[in-house]
Amino acid sequence: MPNVNELFSLKGRTAIVTGGGQGLGKSMAIGLAQAGADIVIAARRIETALATQKEIEALGVKCTVIKGDMRVEEDVIRMVNQVVEEYGKIDILFNNAGTWRGDDAEKVTTEDWKEVIDVNLTGPFIVSREVGKVMLKQGKGSIINVASMSGMIVNTPQNQCAYNASKGGLIMLTKSMAAEWADRGVRVNALCPGYMRTEMSEERYQRKDPAIERWFSMTPMGRSGVPDELMGIAVYLASDASSFVTGSTYLVDGGYTAW
């Protein structure tokens, strides 16, 4: 019988976290590092990533920051080649980089629509495809796509059709890749947070946006989540503790979708 502590250990493994310099990505990257993984942070803006790098290295693991746009194939291929050259393998991928645009559907511009779809869906596809090639050669790997409960329900009171569509598409991409790669050793799952208080949403909290009270009233736990509450599920999905899990969607939403 395996030791449960060993199942959750990530010692000796290499993890890429896109958008890992702040917010949800930062907490997940630190959680993986605490479990023993070496971390690669891929980000368009590296100032915050460099600060996070110092926190991760203080945990006694290696951390590399790579600047790049995950929507651009050349950037992704360069990143993957650099990671393989430096670390020799890629064990874990967290597709976390994302964006949000909200408006009434009839007001959403084609440019805004494309921006959201490109960042939230096309980017994760490109990264998963290129990292997947490495993992398939290895015969092992775990890909976690950070989707959202918004890929499963339509939020209220804010209108955000592009965001919802991008996250719904990411969930289906997760299932599709999981089904294709399951018998070749690569697992693909989706993590779907609910309302989380991060740098991206902090402005709403500071100005006491009336939407927040609505969110809380519709959440059984009566509050938003904080990024550190994703550390545990991140380690679980990345580790051998979830070795029989693929094509699954994990909600972390304080019960929001239960009502």
Image (spheres, rainbow, N blue to C red):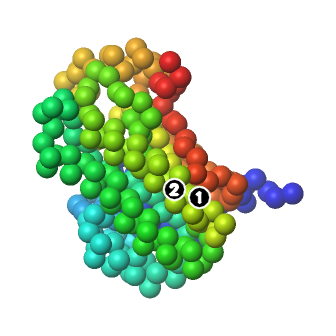
Pointer 2 local density, CA inside 10 Å: few below 14, some 14–19, many at least 20: few
- The answer to whether residue 182 is above or below residue 87 is above
**Which residue is painted at 55% across and 73% down in the image?**
135
Residue closest to the eye, 18 or 188: 188
**Which residue is painted at 40% across and 47% down in the image?**
169
Q: Which residue is mark 1?
A: 179
Total tally of numbered discs in the picture: 2
Residue 176, numbered circle: 2
**Which residue is painted at 30% across and 64% down in the image?**
70
In the rendered structure, the answer to whether residue 34 lies left or right of residue 28 reads: right
The image quadrant of residue 250 is top right
Q: Amino acid at mark 2?
A: Ser
Q: Secondary structure at mark 2?
A: helix
Residue 44: x, y in percent? 24, 62
- The N terminus, quarter of image: bottom right
Q: Are marks 2 and 1 in contact (CB under 8 Å)?
A: yes
Pointer 1 local density, CA inside 10 Å: few below 14, some 14–19, many at least 20: some
In the rendered structure, the answer to whether residue 102 lies left or right of residue 153 reads: left
Distance between mark 2 and mark 1 Cα atoms: 5 Å
- The answer to whether residue 126 is above or below residue 245 is below
Residue 21: x, y in percent? 33, 56
Residue 82, numbered circle: none
Residue 199: x, y in percent? 28, 41
Is residue 20 visible to us here? no
**Which residue is painted at 15% across and 38% down in the image?**
108
Residue closest to the eye, 178 or 86: 178
The image quadrant of residue 11 is bottom right
